Amino acid sequence: LGATIDLEETYAWGQEELARIVAEMEATAQRIKPGASVKEAIAVLDADPRYQLHGTDALRAWMQGKADQVIAEFADVHFDIPEPVRRIECMIAPTQTGGIYYTGPSDDFTRPGRMWWSVPRGVTEFSTWRELTTVYHEGVPGHHLQIAQTTYRRELLNAWRRNMCFTSGHGEGWALYSERLMDELGYLEDPGDYMGMLDGQSLRAARVVLDIGLHCGFEAPAELGGGEWTYDKAWAFLTEHANMDESFLRFELDRYLGWPGQAPSYKVGERLWMQLREECAQREGDAFDLKAFHRRALDIGSVGLDVLREAVLR
């Protein structure tokens, strides 16, 4: 994070935030199919041909189209996007491990920033409702805007700060903030796309509770019967709040056990970004300009979140 936080307060907040997200998912399920549970609504979405892509060529074209659309609509409106940053390439990764990731541009932008989809072997069908929010997370306004814009700011940042420095709470917090921003700006009005964003947020909030609870020895949530956290309780909690394959979730849980503090940095980082924006808005009143806030914050580069706050509010 690069920030000092109250772990007990953050643990309690994580449980409250998860409960809020679960309630929102339940309400959204009713928009998808009246009377449906969340799992039933997800099954409806997975069976709906409107959200289906067939083959990796269609997947890559869809990713590219969504990324290009947002850049065209956001430039000079919600963000200052330098001309070289307005180019992103969406690629199918040579690996087959699953997931989407981003690689930054070369220092001179002869190689643009790239969003990669690592498609598991044998997978040919893709559900856009699950992944639209991830395109925003990895592309614009998420990692591409954040990382490529930092690379571009030669007049402000040295080479190390432009190309080699990455603080998880800052970077992943910004990417989650970007997902929420896309909802605020009306890009997730479709109930399926909105459910996809909430589904990802549920996992990130569950990470906060599970990671801090396990490593700090806090009492387990009431839904687990309280008491001491155990591996079995952690597994039950994770599978309840993440609609993903067992193999992926086993990997996730093992990662939390061996890398304390990394998994919560996404959601806690988002929280600190939102708090900073609100603090600036309250301080500046009617003069607050969201585009100017984004420019001011991103121009600082990837730093600890306490340093970010101090620099933005200076």
Image (cartoon, rainbow, N blue to C red):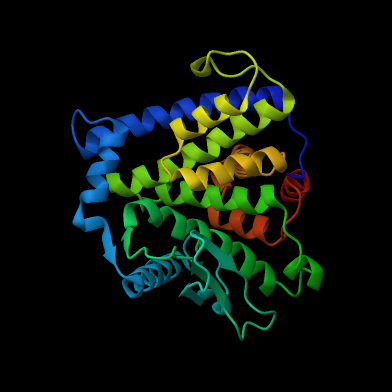
Query: Would residue 79 be visible to someone looking at this image?
Result: no
Residue pictured at 67% horizontal, 23% vertical: 9
Residue pictured at 31% horizontal, 35% vertical: 39
Q: In this rendering, would 260 be left or right of 29?
A: right
Residue 166, above or below 208:
below
Residue pictured at 76% horizontal, 67% vertical: 164
Q: In this rendering, would 216 be left or right of 241?
A: right
Q: Provide residue 36's location: percent of width, then percent of height.
A: 23, 31
Q: Nearer the viewer, residue 126 or 95?
A: 95
Residue 57, above or below 50:
below
Q: Nearer the viewer, residue 153 or 230?
A: 230
Q: Provide residue 91's location: percent of width, then percent of height.
A: 47, 74
Q: Provide residue 296's location: percent of width, then percent of height.
A: 66, 57
Residue 71, above or below 196:
below
Q: How many numbered marks appear? A: 0
Quadrant of the drawing holding the N terminus: top right
Q: Provide residue 203's location: percent of width, then percent of height.
A: 50, 39
In the orientation shown, which residue stands out farthest toward the bottom? 110
Toward which corner of the image does residue 26 lie, by quadrant?
top left
Residue pictured at 67% horizontal, 83% vertical: 108
Query: Would residue 294 be visible to someone looking at this image?
Result: yes
